[in-house]
Image (spheres, rainbow, N blue to C red):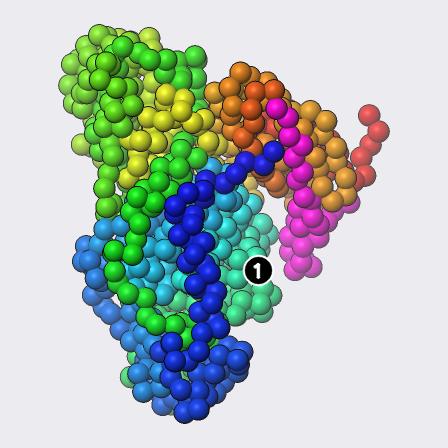
Amino acid sequence: MRRRGPAAGALACALAAAATVAGASAQATAATGRCGDPARRPWCGTSLTPDQRAALLLPRMTEDEKIALLASDDPMGGPLGGFIETAHADTNDGIDRLGVPPLYMADGPAGVRQGRATALPAPIALAAGFDPAAARLYGGTVAWEARHRGNDLVFGPTVDVLRTPRNGRAFEGFGEDPYLSAGIGTSWIQGAQEQGVMASVKHFTVYAQETDRLSLSMNVDPRTLREIYLPPFEAAVKQARVATVMCGFGKVNGRWACQDGTSLNGILRGEWGFKGFVPSDHTAAQDTAGAANGGLDMELPLGMKYNAFLLKAAVQQRKVTQAAIDGHVRTILRTMFEFGVFDRPAYPNDLSGIDRTASATAARRLAENGITLLKNDGVLPLRAPASIALVGRPAAQSQAGFGSARVEPFDAVSAREGIARRAGSGVQVTYSDGGDRSAAAEAARKADVAVVFASDSQGEFFDKSCLTLQCGDPLRGDQDALISEVAKANPNTIVVLETGGPVLTPWAGQVKGIVEAWYPGQEAGNALARVLYGDVDPGGRLPVTFPVAENDAPTAGNAAQYPGVGKTTTFSEGVMVGYRHYDAKGIAPRFPFGHGLSYTTFAYSGLTVGSGSAQVTVTNTGTRPGVAVPQLYVGMPSPGSGIPQPPKQLKGYAKLTLAPGQSSRVTFPLTTRSLAYWNTAAGAWKVADGCYKIMVGGSSRAIAQTGTLGTCAAR
């Protein structure tokens, strides 16, 4: 039986109602919108197509009005948007004379960064859910709140595939696999745009690190670009019909990302048929003529390159044609028409329209859905211990990533609060911040169970300097030593990690339980308590690989790969990113991609493989209901010398809740694209001749069933 997504309840009803309203807005009469009377302004007629309306409006605009539409008008909104209740990240003032409404924009990959909002778990936790329904709820929740803060567009989701685990923004994306990132990102966008808010998928085309990000030159071969970094954007365009695609910082193969005509005009618009507009990341535009000719439609946070002085000069000097400027304006207008911005009243900036209880419920369910049980030697779920020692500062205040994805929460429930409430008055719950390791160990020694909370520190602007827990934040002290001390004092020690990505766990053999909670959001305490006590099954599976040692990780020990030499980084690892790297090199990870335990057990049987799908039966073989996440991997034949294939690639997954003894037959579609590689010489996707290995199991290293497809030698 398919698992019902977590979108049930009050928030789901509110989001469904909002989607109905949003859909109806496209059919609204001009009288209810901001455009005006179609008799006087024919582009306001809603029976026309977006292209027809833009074609009618464009000739009525003056040169200055056209240029004004190509940049944000709010230089203060960006840096202050997270602290001032009314400030948007960016604003384009529109053209009142012609009925072109203002366009209000907000940061939002993890919740709305505009004053206070619901702090959802980090996007990496969403990816750990392996659950498109949850992603739809996540995007819908963000957009619902963005809409009630008066925004027409939200900057999210972030779908940059994780190349190095040191990446400071690892928490903001969906992990190391392009197939998973594409699926989660697509559902996020669909959920958001159903609420009548445009999404902006980011950062096109490649954005892999914070070190030197503003000036970094990235050399990426065509196959790696197509197979690893572009699929999430391609899915966003083709499957989710995303409204906008944000271009990022740095150069890709010698061309600035926000003026790379090969990617923006050739691939994005030409091959994929993208009809929306391209805004820049803040200050990413480098050159007026280069950006105008290379595909950038709107500069953010203001017109430093796209202003009347520079653009008019570029036209006079014949560096930019008037047709190019008109093309950018037309694209922005048609996108606003397509998404109904002209045809509805402005969204009010009104916090009272947000059902905080429903949003908090969504935050809790999303956190539970992504919490990942990495190790369990019988200590979990908790069985009514008489005393619990909580150790570590994150127990009192959960960690969150910083930068444009940081959210100031409406409320916050700490793990200390949530666990104490769930434990009840008859259980002694003590707390030590871990600053004094001896005192923490003594508190643990006196308790039935010790739970140590540890976190990393990451966010925008800086990469982590290493993968140990205290890296990047000396105030945390030696958390690895703290865990070891507590484990010596109490044999029933559980570690709860609140990290934005992979970290080293040298103490893994010393503790009985390890729970990865990621950055769990404002409902951290309630979600963790419910998982630790077994009120819900831990729903997460790893979207990233946890290495045993620092040098095991991708790009480790190769300065040319990362962080680069002379502000140039070469992606010489090719397609061997994430678990592909570990598999290809025969490196055993600490915890593999896709790994995550349940409080029950599952068996896989009866794998069948056909030309269009693979099927497998999943059975709950334990005594409790639980969540299974069967994963399908494909081992592809090499099409020739010099074109290595990873031992396996994720090409399907499902999420099921099964009762004890219950079985479910799961179908994984297998399309031509599932079996294709990028043929650089042909400039196209090709399916190689040979034998394809089909693998199904509970993680990339826990393959339970195998089959074949194609031309395979008899065994």
The picture places residue 340, in percent across and down from the top left corner, at: 44, 71
Tell me the SS state at disc 1.
helix
Residue 673 versus residue 335: which sits nearer the camera?
Answer: 335
Is residue 285 left or right of 128 when viewed as pictured?
A: left
Q: Taking the image as drawn, is residue 451 in sight?
A: yes
Residue range highlighted in magenta? 662-689
| Magenta stretch holds residue 44 | no
Q: Label 1: which residue?
A: 238
> Which quadrant: the N terminus?
top right
Q: In this image, 415 relative to 240: left or right? A: left
Q: Percent from the top left, x then y, of residue 644?
A: 64, 41
Q: Residue 428 appears at what percent x and percent y?
A: 21, 14
State which quadrant residue 149 falls in.
Answer: bottom left
Q: Residue at x 80, y 35 (%)?
A: 712
Residue 3 versus residue 537 in the image, above or below? below
- Residue 635 makes an appearance in the image: no
**Image quarter of the C terminus:** top right
Which residue appears at 36% of the width and 65% of the height? Answer: 152
Who's the residue at 33% across and 26% down the image? 529
Quarter holding residue 198: bottom left
Q: Nearer the viewer, residue 663 or 484?
A: 663
Residue 659 vs residue 60, the one in the foreground: 659
Left or right, residue 610 beside residue 579 = right
319 to 546, vertically: above or below = below
Q: Position of residue 576 (x, y in %)?
A: 55, 40
Mark 1 neighbour class, 10 Å CA radius: few under 14, some 14 to 19, many 20 or more: few
- Kind of residue indicated by mark 1: Lys
Residue 670 part of the magenta-drawn span: yes
